[in-house]
Amino acid sequence: MTDFKDHLFVLIVCGGSGTRLWPRSRQKTPKQFINLFGEKSLFAQTMERARGLVPDEGIFISTNADYVDEVLSQGNLSLKNIIAEPQPRNTAIAIAASAAVIAKIDPQAVIVNLWSDHLISPLEKFIAETNLAAEVAFAGDYLVDIGLKPSFPHTGFGYLHAVEPLPEFKESQVLKVKEFKEKPDLKTAEMFCQSGEYYWNIGLYTWRADSFLKACAKHAPKISQEAMKIQAAWGTKDEKKVFDEVWSQAEEISIDYAISEKADNLVLIPASFNWSDVGDWQVVYEVGKKDKNGDMFVKLGEKGEVYSSDSKQNLVQFSERLVALVGVKDLVIIDTPDVLLVCQKEKVQGVKKIVETLKKKGKKEFL
């Protein structure tokens, strides 16, 4: 009997610029490639998760063409496993094109979709639940999503309504998805949270390549046609030409709006692991290691130092200089060689506005 593990692949989606984590996250080295916690980069940690599922030849990376060298350097993969996007076009075409390429390699492929900027622990629970997702996807025509019970009414996530068990996997807590609602308003999100029957979509999709491509053809025909063109050209002399042509006119839409909201064969596995989308400095502080005063200090260079007096609950990342804190609380202080950011933790969403202002003023050297 064929095992799903014989056909398992991992696709890591590695795009995005991470402007809310400026000035550490820049256009040339976005957040997934930098050391945010004094440890490995988020991308390096994602590679570890992928390698816990499949050997290197089964790992593919969908990334911006500008990031290929960094992916090769940190990921230590073959260039043939990198699917380079000529320009950002959101996630639907990126995931569909990658699925089409993998399906050309193995028509029975089961694809686990990971994201390069997620923080997940412990690894053992993630591996177990992802393998279950792959088993479910391989056994039937299902699009499997690992979902997380919401801890507050977040309006930036999709919500999955799932209660009824899938009969074939009753004992494994696999649930049928009745409804998928992407990014609801606050009132709706509050209602979803109170019901206890909804889960956050955190983007950890697993599906058979053929099932997903069939869903694309049904729900997003234009995306499907573009993906099939790339599949036909992949590995031929026309590969780059076709890739550039398709990408220049590809519809810019997320996988959640294009497929997930419309699919009628979506099932859910509740996550038991810890998960975080490291989207801003507040999140970095919340998930990072803190001292007895609630301060999180991250040393980035060899010379930097920090001294604190009567201060607490601050996030400080420092590289070359001495940073001194006196009587301050709940600040984010990011000291890089060319930029110093100081803001209140509750105001970190405003960092993106600073980046937009710098763009308008043509300050490219700081982006």
Image: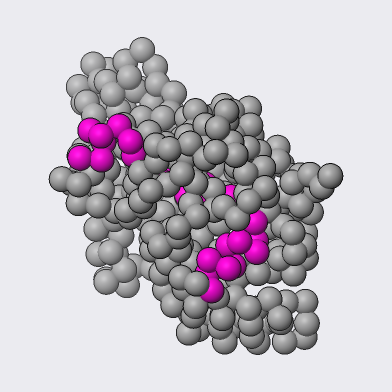
Between residues 199 and 336, which one lies in front from this camera angle? Answer: 199
Residue that sits furthest to the left in the current view:
187
Q: Is residue 279 visible?
A: no
Q: Is residue 246 above or below residue 365?
A: below
Q: Position of residue 336 (x, y in %)?
A: 41, 45
Q: Residue at x 49, y 80 (%)?
A: 222
Question: Against 96, is 282 above or below?
Answer: above
Q: Is residue 194 magenta?
A: yes
Between residue 161 and residue 351, name the one nearer to us. Answer: 161
In magenta, the rendered stretch is 191-217
- Where is residue 168? Give x, y as percent: 60, 39
Q: Residue at x 20, y 39 (%)?
A: 190
Picture residue at 30% right of the left edge, 28% below the top: 314
Left or right: 237 in relation to 342: right
Give the residue drawn at x 21%, y 26%.
Answer: 328
In the image, is residue 240 above or below residue 103? below
Quadrant the N terminus occupies: top right
Q: Is residue 150 left or right of residue 146?
A: left
Q: Nearer the viewer, residue 361 or 152?
A: 152
Q: Residue furthest top?
A: 292
